[in-house]
Amino acid sequence: MPAPGPTALLAVLSLLAATACSKEVVCSADQTAYQGQCLSLSSDPKNCGSPGFACQQGQSCSEGSCCAGTRCSPTIFLACFDNAQVRGATGSLALVGAPVSVDSGPISFARVGSALWVANSQSNTLDLIGPGLSAPVSSVSIPYSGFADLEYLGSSGGLLYASNDAVGSIVVVDPVGLAPVGEIPLGAQSYPQGIAFGGTTTAYVALNGSDAVAVVDLSSQKMTKAIDLSTLASPGDRAMPSRLLLDGTRLYVTLWNLHPDFSQGGNGLLAVIDTTTNALATGPNPVDLGATCLDPAGITLRAGTLYVTCGFFAYNSTAVTGGGILPVDVSGQTPSPKAIVATPGAAPGPITFCGDVAFVGDRVSGNVLRFDPTQGAVTGKAELCVPRTGSSGYVADVACGQ
């Protein structure tokens, strides 16, 4: 057989090149493959809504539409604790709209329908954010004694529930009547934090001060049981439950597992409660999150996987150890921690999925991280809560736009 000529060789090389160029591109969950590239059509101002469609100079791309200033629809809302502001941002982590000033220490968001409320820790107030992203249109004061310290805000059955940490109670607020309509005592120095709701009948509250989870009957507004978690802590440490997530009949609770003086303790832990018995679940309990996950903070769930945020830092310090985002497979009977996604220099706290990607607030800076579970990586970071002079900043909560 005669050797192939130059024309035949060129044809083969062209075919090989075309085959290589047509190789499928694997993009992250929030991107679209187009001509061998991964495009963020919902947030890229150079490819907004469709490939090649560029926004005008000074415009942002939000939800696939070009917009400018206050006309942009925020993909996420941020509680900027340090400077008493609520900010809006696009999915590409570009600020949109003007900052909205609220009372001191915004720490936690909750929605009642489409209305966005924020709890302000240092003033013990709740503010209703105006339409879109505008000044608060209503405010509710929560009674306290000694010092103000709201820690968490949740909603169920059209009512708001605020963790009144300093008092040791949950305050029930009517968002229509703009007034407290009940209070659920949880014990002196119980220091309630996160709340999870089992429908409209039951709430579970992390009691950070008494190392327990309170079971609350919402109809009678009474605590019916305290589930003791103190024995789950490492020797010499306290459990210090913080945030909760209810998935079916399993309630997952992050445990700080710190020394009594709040200095660094053992590995981060995850308690598992069976809500059919309101007792600790059988099997490995607590789940050891490992030495790379210290002082676990936020928790969320997507497609059979919990994502727990971690990172210990001493008071008045920004030096972080054991920081990252830890996937925990809960698709089977026994939760199984996977490899942590390290976040050097950051102590991730609140984590919220908006669509297929998560947005995470940093507890030691004004940075917000965008996390893609498909890539298992942080795909973006920006300082969106600019700290005051001499302060480190603190992104206390993240909520999705409507």
Image (spheres, rainbow, N blue to C red):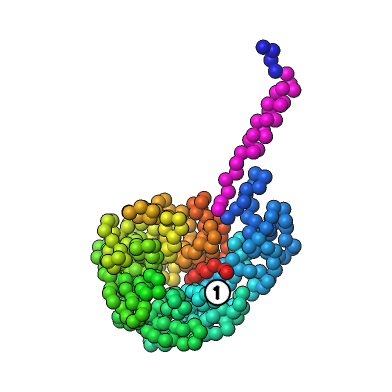
**What's the residue at 57%, 45% (across, down)?**
26
Q: Is residue 163 left or right of residue 38?
A: left
**What's the residue at 37%, 75% (across, down)?**
201
Query: Farthest top residue?
Result: 1
Tell me residue 45's x, y (percent).
68, 59
Q: Nearer the viewer, residue 40 or 296?
A: 40
Tell me residue 262's x, y (percent).
34, 69
Q: In this view, does 194 lie above or below 336?
A: below
Say if the magenta span includes residue 19.
yes
Q: Which amino acid does label 1 sit on?
A: Ser
Q: How many labels does the image show?
A: 1
SS assignment at label 1 = loop
Image quarter of residue 137: bottom right
Tell me residue 352's x, y (percent).
49, 64
Tell me residue 206's x, y (percent).
35, 71
> Quadrant of the image for the C terminus?
bottom right
**What's the residue at 55%, 85% (across, down)?**
138
Q: Mark 1 points at which residue?
A: 114
Q: In this view, does 175 lie above or below 261?
A: below
Say if the magenta span includes residue 101.
no
Q: Is residue 49 above or below residue 79?
A: above
**What's the residue at 64%, 38% (across, down)?**
22
Magenta highlight: main SS? helix
Q: Give the range drawn in magenta.
A: 5-29
Q: Which of 62 and 236 is in front in this view?
A: 62
**Residue 388 visible in rendering:** no
Q: Is residue 236 left or right of residue 335?
A: left
Other residues around mark 1 within 10 Å, as few (<14) / some (14–19) / many (≥20): few
Q: In this view, does 110 lie to the left or right of 17?
A: left
> Quadrant of the image for the N terminus?
top right
**Residue 10 visible in rendering:** yes
